[in-house]
Amino acid sequence: MDEVTDAMGSTEAQEQLSWLMDRLDELSGHHVVHTAIGLHPDEPVGVCASLFSLAVHRTDHDNPRVAVARTALAMAGPEQRPGWTCRFLDLPSSLPCCLIAGTIATPGSGQPVFQARVATAHAQSPYIVVLGLTSASLQHAEAYTDILEAVTHTVGFTDPGSSPPRAARPSRISEVLL
């Protein structure tokens, strides 16, 4: 870890990564089953960290559309926030899906971070899958939203060992980055 923070150069970038690492343990209480940390070039700090997470929540609703809508409302919070995005996504799976994105204040420090989250129904109810992408790099919020949406379009609910391989689809992530 020290080698990574030293390579990042700036004190601010090191503080961001340290803050992020200190909070990884807290994710288990939010049903997170997977995380990935990204380090991205960013000015003026040099490098900015981002966190991708995948959580699975059990729901008590039989209707997946209602379950996704209630999850999205909970993620958006009790009041309308200026500058926030909330929209439904049409997925290849036809499962209900909603994207919520905007800036939040981090607990304790009040420092703003960008967070994009997607809630979609699991193919085998009663579960909701929540994908999240969080970063202190506010100026790249639109790109992070596009990346999370592209990742969401690749989500599938099949056992990779039981089905024949499918032809590779073009990468929407590479489209976003070009």
Image (tube, helix red, strand yellow):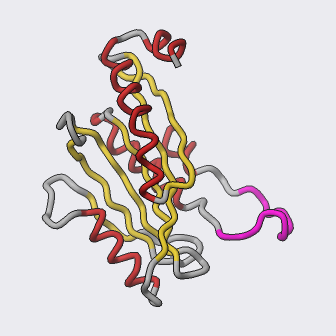
Write the residue at 28% across / 68% down: 74
Front residue of 63/44: it is 63
Describe residue 3's horizontal placement relative to residue 110 as left or right: right
Is residue 93 shown above or below 43? Answer: below
Magenta stretch contains residue 28: no
In the rendering, at what x and y percent does residue 22 appear? 40, 33
In the rendering, at what x and y percent does residue 16 appear? 35, 26
Write the residue at 37% across / 23% down: 42
Q: Give the magenta-colored segment's residue range.
A: 157-168
The extreme bottom residue here reads 62
Write the residue at 32% across / 77% down: 70
Quarter residue 137 falls in? top left
In the rendering, at what x and y percent does residue 100 appear? 32, 60
Describe residue 145's horizontal placement relative to residue 81 as left or right: right
Front residue of 110/116: it is 110
The total of numbered circles placed on residues is 0
Write the residue at 50% across / 11% down: 7
In the rendering, at what x and y percent does residue 172 appear? 56, 51
Magenta stretch contains residue 160: yes
Quarter residue 111 falls in? top left
